[in-house]
Amino acid sequence: MRRYLDVLALVAVLGLVAVACGGDEGGETGTTGATGETSAELQPGGTLELALISDIDYAWDPNKSYYSVTWSYYRCCLLRTLMSYNGKPTSEGGADLVPDIAAEAPQQSSDGLTWTFTLKSGVNYSPPFEDVSVTSGDIVRAIMREADPDASAGGYPFYYSVIEGFDDFTAGKADSISGLETPDDSTLVVTTTQPAGEVPYLFSLSASAPIPPDAEGELMGAAEGHTKDYGRFLVATGPYMFAGTENLDFSLPAEEQQPIAGVEVGKSYQLVRNPSWDPSTDSLRPAYPDAINITIGGDEQDLYNKVVAGELDLVGDGVVPAQLVRQFSTDPTLQPYLHVSQDDVVRYLEMNVAEPPFDDIHVRKAVNLALDKAGMRQVRGGETFGAIAGHIITDGLEDNLLADYDPYATPNSAGDIAAAQAEMAQSKYDTDGDGVCDDPVCDGTLAITDEADPYPDQAALIQQNLEPLGITLDVKAFERTTMYNKCLDPATHNAICLAPGWGKDFPDAYTFGPPLFGSAAIYPSCCNRSLVGASSDLLQESGYEVTEVPNVDAQMDECVALPAGDDRVACWADIDKLLMEEVVPFVPYLFDNNVDITSQRIVNYSFDQFAGLAAWDQLAIAPEAQ
């Protein structure tokens, strides 16, 4: 996924929490309350006080948003979609795709090209459209907006290209999307250009959330004229809406409409209950708080101190400071408010398979064997923050088929220089076979990393690990967005990117495959920084000497065509093994955990496996604190 895990740059902390939280590393906290209450005993009410350290203006637009925080925000609270998730960890069904606005799972045609969704009745919009029910045409409107390159800039329209006619609409060659049909208000028929088992998942993403029509019958309905700022005019379908939404006046020209009062970009957001929301149509969202206040910005340490003091209930995108992890993990009275959950995120080194010396598979394998993964984890904070990774796609997306698979396992996960040198000895860059690169390309190899902690310390460890192989790194550190852009652009000729992380977009390994390793995902379209699948023309245009690199497009296409189920999961597991053994573009080292602390006002916590963050609607406040 292209959500670059800005909120997950973890600091060094003691590895004590796994035991304190009642589980092994990678364990999950469920939805039992911090005080031991069960969901049946929980009482709605009160105002949840949250903080976000960062804010991205465009990201609050559902068609632009490609960020885990906003996806969590939409799923839990503001927007319903045809399909969705229950806001719980995997062990409680949190990775299971279930109907939301849809009345049931979609029906797929025998040729695999057509999907038919049937909508529930009685799902209405928030004021000022409280008398308007969601129809199939409103879903089409959302997908058309995602196909508008101006409205979806920074988003993920590439996922929807599989819908027939989507790309033609994007290119201005058609005034509708031929693969979207609405026989009636409660039926949506989706036709694809090829069998694509991920289609139901695409209709769980916020880009597919319905947009209401306006009185003028404009193509984009309520979003008409708001190409760049629809997030400030958003009409909700979930249990909450922005405060002041009822005062929106869509009868005015877009430029004369006043934005929602409860949205102060870069400062604060205020959510209140949506009076149109009918819980009888929504079994996924308990919506415990009466209101949710969100403040933006501030010093991270200060924000967490406010959580401890009860002035805030949760920092939604922060990194729990080291001393608080120690405090909460060792104090029995605080342990119930420390939450460690297994996320679907992998951290890795990414090697450019077209750039010497990493154009040699033996060098790439040697780096896998040399890396001290345990040391990399310790720099990030120890066992609390994740499990050692032996492959690329997270275990939760492969039903644990590869849980015990690691083709480059080393004693105590600390690296094995002897084994690494034996692999290096087979490389064309080691002419005398002594396990040490003796070609000048290994001296001062360009490596790009993140300038923020803990990446400088990790870069130093990586340098130390690679020196016995004769590889010295010229490490360049940048601000995170700049780092990703430089790693992504083939013209930089970076040899190895030291700081990437990748999390799923939805609970299917498809979101790890084509975006990371597909030829169509190479710059500028998406996220393939290793150049796996690069064409000879692209390599030549970018100034590479090699004319051919590994390509796994055909193998991935076989997985894409399979319906959801065991065969699809097994297919992606095979792709994972193929990448690890025959392509080797990555050195995966950590499967992340998410770590939160909550205030003592909170008596129920749930980890939303879909978003990889706390499920805000399930944070229940103690009655005496309401």
Image (cartoon, rainbow, N blue to C red):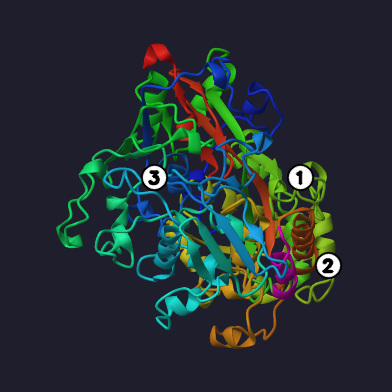
Is 40 situated above or below 496? above
Where residue 169 appears, as percent x and y from the top left, is: 44, 76
Label located before the other in sequence (3 or 1): 3
Residue at 80% from the left image edge and 76% from the top image edge: 431
Mark 2: amino acid? Asp
Whether residue 178 appears in this view of the structure is yes
Dot label at residue 434: 2
Is 33 situated above or below 113? above
Residue that numbered label 1 is attached to: 413
Separation of marks 3 and 1 at Cα, in angstroms: 53 Å
Discs 1, 2 touching: Cβ within 8 Å: no
Q: Secondary structure at mark 1?
A: helix
Mark 3: amino acid? Asn
Is 573 situated above or below 42? below
Label located before the other in sequence (2 or 3): 3
Residue that numbered label 3 is attached to: 124
Front label number (3 vs 1): 3
Mark 1: amino acid? Ser
For the stretch drawn in magenta, what is the main secondary structure?
helix
**Quadrant of the rendering where the N terminus is positioned:** bottom right
**Quadrant of the rendering where the C terminus is positioned:** top left
Q: Secondary structure at mark 3?
A: loop
Question: Residue 555: within the magenta?
Answer: yes
Front label number (1 vs 2): 1
The residue closer to the viewer here, 187 or 302, is: 187
